[in-house]
Image (spheres, grey):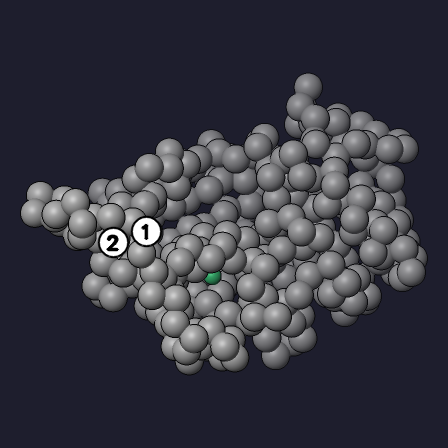
Amino acid sequence: MARSPITVSGPRSVVHGWEVSTRRSAAALRLSDASPLAKVSVRADADGALADALGVRFRGSRREDGVLVIGSGPGEWLLVGRVGMAPEIAEKVRGQGEGEFATIVDLTHGRALMRLSGRDAARTLAKVCAVDLSDDLTPDGAAFRTSVAKVATDVVRDDAGGGAGESSYLLHCERSSGQYLFDCLLDAGMEFGVEPAGPHLNQDEPAR
Amino acid sequence: MIVIPCPHCSVRNASEFRHVGEAGSRPDPATVTPEQWRAYLYERSNPAGWTTETWFHTVGCRRYITVERHTVTNEIRAARPAGRDGRGGREPAEVLSTRADSGSPDAGGQA
Ligand SMILES: [Zn+2]
């Protein structure tokens, strides 16, 4: 059975071979461990054919066929999809490059992924991250890599994965820093009443 | 505090970067004299004023950038991707080739 780097607490079940929390929270601010989602890294020419096919550049993101395509660096992408979907995603990207040199790696088990959702998500994140999170500079869909609680973290604002009218952020870091980052975000969110919650991993919600 | 306008990522605190040092071009190993090689390795002009230096954005785009900084005021008047334009110090591809985990065909060079 696959395990996330972040400890599962409370009720749990096994989804597609991963042990996940099934805790539900109605709190205004929730933090969930989304590490089981498929994560595929793509590196290629920043302005090549594959970049055009992926349809997004560094600092942007978009959804296509249930996959969140994130421009995580210059010439660097992270594709996030349903649990177990990594081989399918990698295969699709492989067919898009028109023979261009590219590196496609399944990082699912090497990284931690978590989602912070709620009205106070930006205020919580602002306590541990120096990037301006205002709508002008970090609108829905914005992606960037920066220091979050001193951990190099890919941040994506992905409001579609949160509740109605809420902002929501995906945070992606090295597996070994996952538990630490999760705990730091719980600590930062304490004053806003943050609660840990199980991830939504069903078919219709690729990156919730 | 120094704030660096990364050409890839936008404005970031200097704590996200590693200071590499004064930018300069590497002499051709085939023709260089020992004196020139020593100067390339060890001698720095270290001015009290404007200097052109290389920074590495460790916790961001993971690219080398060339920064023009005033060493007295820490004012920064220019920042651009390092490398292929011939003014950016070490060629990123040359540096990255020594790192097994960072081989990217487009390392640096893009505006
Ligand atoms: Zn940068």
Residue B82 in view:
no
Q: In terms of secondary structure, where does tag 2 sit?
A: helix
Q: Is A34 in front, or is A15?
A: A34
Check the image and report above or below for A127 versus A106. below
The label number, if any, that marks residue B42 in the structure image = 1
Q: Residue at x 41, y 78 (%)?
A: B49
* Residue A120 coordinates in the image, percent (x, y): 82, 66
- Residue A133 falls left or right of residue A97: right
Contact? badges 1 and 2 (CB < 8 Å)? yes
Q: Amino acid at mark 2?
A: Ala
Which residue is the site of mark 2? B39
Q: Residue at x 65, y 34 (%)?
A: A176
Q: CA distance from mark 1 to mark 2?
A: 5 Å
Q: In terms of secondary structure, where does tag 1 sit?
A: helix
Chain assignment, label 1: B
* Residue A35 coordinates in the image, percent (x, y): 66, 38
Q: Name the quadrant containing residue A1.
A: top right
